[in-house]
Image (tube, helix red, strand yellow):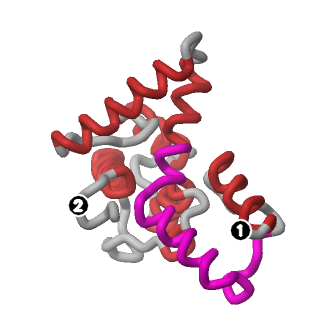
Amino acid sequence: MSSSFDAHLAGLIQTGDPPVDALREEDLPEKMKAARDYLYKNRIPQLFQHLLMRTILEKPRDLKNFLVKELAAVHSAMDERREFLGNFTTDDISVMYDMLDLHNVGYITKSQLELALRQLRGGHPSAAAVSVDVPEDAKIEKVAFVKIIKQELAKAYSYTEDTVE
């Protein structure tokens, strides 16, 4: 593989975002596009991001054992089809809402909701095309926000038979 591909892949793994000097879509060789698509289809950047975040938060002495246990927990959540929100809890999502509702008016706008979703999707190519099925003039309250974000996170972190090749 080319060194530009290696740099691109390293940037994705380290941050979940492509490097600043990332190649434009039309400049990418077909093999690189296929590799990138495979990584995103199988949610590898999200998995690495989750593992890195958990490692940073926990600072385990036995890193290898910690990662094995964390991967087993992710696998268990997949097998049981439990709600898996990555590194986020319901409280985290609630705090995110509070940060968006700066003036405590009790609601946020559709564009604020879409901004939150773009931020959560990070470097994923679909981040720019975030759209939710709510009216443009919707006033989104905290309960609805938490529900929508949890659904989107569950989708982002879900692994199904048709997801993994």
Expressed as whole percent of the image width and height from the top left, the position of residue 68 reads 42, 27
**To which residue does mark 1 refer?**
1
Helix, strand or loop status at disc 1: loop
Q: What residue type is labelled 2?
A: Glu
The one nearer the camera, 48 or 83, is 48
| Residue 132 as seen in the image, left or right of residue 34 | left
Expressed as whole percent of the image width and height from the top left, the position of residue 122 reads 58, 57
**Which image quarter holds the C terminus?**
bottom left
Most extreme residue toward the front, as rendered?
Answer: 1
Disc marking residue 161: 2
Q: Identify the mark nearer the N-term, 2 or 1.
A: 1
Residue 34 magenta-drawn? Answer: yes
Expressed as whole percent of the image width and height from the top left, the position of residue 85 reads 36, 42
Helix, strand or loop status at disc 2: loop
Expressed as whole percent of the image width and height from the top left, the position of residue 89 reads 38, 33
As measured in the structure, the alpha-carbon distance from the residue carrying label 2 to the one carrying label 1 is: 29 Å
